[in-house]
């Protein structure tokens, strides 16, 4: 008996919808399954969608998809409880079509993308979680949804980091996610009248503004960053935390978000804004979060489920890699279908494509990022050092001015940070960031 579908895609996030669109465009009989009542309702991103990976499946997506603003300015900064120092990059080229990055709200974009998949011919079923994969030895033959098995020669797992279908299977043999390789993102969305928002952030038209912060005032040992992104008439604001750094500490993630929100560098811009949305989500921590393999007999893993999230404190990029990997998985499935191949290694081209397109190099090449991101001094020491240096440079009195190096030495001595440690951390940043 034949299979029910040519391909089954689990999860209607950026990875799953992109895969389903490409498969349907290639005339495959594809099923896209989503546990949320509607595609997008379960999804959460900061979120800035970087780049143009979607061009490959939807050439005019940025004109048609419900994006919020195109980002023209990006700020990166360090905070102590009372101070903040930041660096802002702005680029006139970013303000011109086709733009480099857009702020998005996933409930809107993912629903739109699922609609595009349906329009291209995919069958989209929402509101029922896939219970498990249909394993035959180490091969996947389809899924079980609502107690019903459904078969396909290819199943694409695009169900995000908290992939219950993969845990305890050959894809991720450990039945539990490790706190060392997962991060927790929490986000709130605040509504402001559009004109007020544009005036507050100095924006014209649909120009957008984005910020990433290193908060140096979380309780000792708690590590994570904060972000603020402008949408049309809302602001997305949140923090991403290393889950392991919360263990054994009384710090609660919502208190940390509250502290970030109340910082004087943030709070004035939220004044009078109404909280309209709150969400939390587990995300991967880069290369260390990858599964045992990206493909096997009958299965491929894409997006967050494959660990493809790059966050270095300056940018968070997951959606673009989700789209990219979803399309590569779909192309691999289409190729195997046109060859009529049933060989167990017929999907090996997926991993080769991830390699040849540079995706895996982006992650493997930055495997050392954790040494920077999860260095306690990044949070406990350097924000204080950087803000103190800025304060001294600004307040250096006439007739007693000092060189930057002199200030730096004095600050380092005052903070009891051995110069060798400072040099080691500097080298680690240069090597790994
Ligand atoms: C706070 C925060 C800020 C972020 N900021 C950014 C940013 O600015 N830019 C950026 O590029 N990325 C950002 N990211 C990361 C980005 O959100 C992810 O990388 C991206 O969503 C991954 O897409 P995905 O399709 O792989 O997974 P997801 O978006 O997680 O989608 C998975 C889908 O699978 C569904 N699903 C799960 N299990 C099942 C099941 N058993 N059956 C059926 N369906 C299932 C889910 O409901 C969901 O719809 C951020 C993440 C967070 C949490």
Image: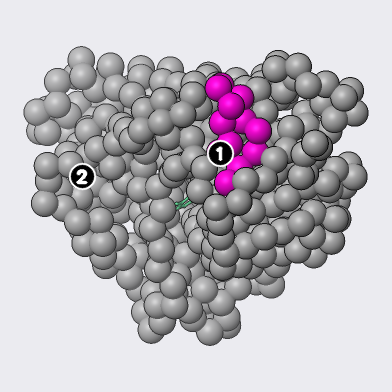
At x 41%, y 82%, the residue is 274
Q: Nearer the viewer, residue 178 or 283?
A: 178
Direction from residue 401 to residue 169 in the image, left or right? right
Of marks 1 and 2, the one in the foreground:
1
At x 12%, y 33%, the residue is 415
Q: Is residue 119 above or below residue 153?
A: below
Mark 1 and 2 residues: CB-CB less than 8 Å, in contact? no
Q: Which residues are magenta?
A: 133-144
| Quadrant in which the N terminus is drawn | top right
| Residue furthest front as drawn | 1
Please tell me in which quadrant of the rendered image residue 7 appears.
top right
Q: Where does residue 178 sit, x and y in percent of width and height?
A: 32, 33
Residue pointed to by mark 2: 246
| Quadrant in which the C terminus is drawn | top left
Do we see residue 132 in this rendering?
A: yes
Judged by its main secondary structure, the magenta piece is strand
Do we see residue 73 in this rendering?
A: no
Q: Is residue 328 above or below residue 231?
A: above
Residue 143 drawn in magenta: yes
Direction from residue 278 to residue 17 in the image, left or right? right
Please tell me in which quadrant of the rendered image residue 8 appears.
top right
Q: Is residue 331 above or below residue 163?
A: above
Please tell me in which quadrant of the rendered image residue 158 appears.
top right
* Residue 133 circle label: 1
């Amino acid at each position: 008996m034949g299979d029910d579908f040519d391909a089954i895609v689990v999860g209607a996030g950026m990875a799953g919808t992109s895969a389903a669109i490409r498969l349907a465009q290639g005339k495959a009989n594809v099923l896209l399954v989503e546990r949320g009542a509607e595609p997008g309702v379960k999804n959460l991103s900061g979120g800035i969608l970087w780049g143009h990976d979607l061009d490959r499946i939807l050439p005019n997506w940025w004109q048609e998809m419900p994006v919020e603003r195109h980002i023209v300015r990006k700020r990166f900064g360090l905070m102590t409880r009372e101070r903040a120092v930041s660096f802002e990059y702005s680029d006139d080229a970013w303000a011109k079509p086709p733009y480099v990055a857009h702020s998005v709200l996933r409930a809107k974009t993912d629903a739109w993308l699922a609609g595009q998949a349906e329009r291209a011919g995919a069958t989209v079923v929402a509101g029922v979680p896939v219970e498990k994969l249909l394993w035959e030895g180490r091969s996947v033959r389809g899924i079980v949804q609502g107690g019903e098995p459904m078969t396909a020669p290819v199943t694409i797992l695009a169900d995000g980091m908290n992939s219950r279908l993969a845990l305890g299977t050959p894809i991720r043999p450990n039945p539990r996610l490790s706190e060392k390789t997962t991060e927790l993102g929490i986000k709130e969305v605040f509504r402001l009248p559009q004109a007020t928002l544009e005036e507050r952030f100095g924006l014209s038209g649909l120009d957008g503004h984005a910020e990433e912060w290193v908060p140096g005032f979380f309780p000792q040992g708690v590590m994570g960053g904060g972000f603020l992104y402008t949408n049309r008439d809302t602001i997305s604001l949140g923090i991403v935390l290393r889950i392991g750094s919360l263990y054994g500490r009384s710090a609660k993630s919502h208190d940390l978000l509250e502290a970030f929100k109340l910082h004087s560098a943030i709070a004035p811009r939220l004044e009078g804004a109404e909280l309209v949305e709150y969400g939390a989500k587990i995300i991967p921590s880069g290369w260390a979060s990858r599964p045992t393999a990206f493909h096997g007999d009958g299965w491929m893993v894409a997006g967050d489920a494959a660990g493809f999230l790059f966050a270095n404190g300056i940018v968070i990029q997951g959606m673009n890699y989700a789209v990219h990997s979803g399309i590569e998985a779909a192309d691999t499935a289409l190729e195997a279908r046109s060859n009529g191949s049933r060989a167990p290694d017929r999907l090996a081209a997926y991993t080769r494509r991830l390699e040849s397109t540079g995706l895996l190099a982006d992650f493997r090449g930055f495997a050392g990022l954790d040494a920077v991101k999860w260095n306690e001094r990044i949070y406990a020491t350097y924000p204080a050092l950087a803000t103190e240096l800025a304060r001294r440079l600004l307040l250096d009195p006439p007739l007693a001015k000092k060189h930057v190096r002199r200030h730096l030495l004095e600050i380092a001595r005052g903070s009891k940070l051995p110069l060798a440690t400072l040099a080691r951390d500097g080298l680690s940043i240069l090597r790994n960031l």
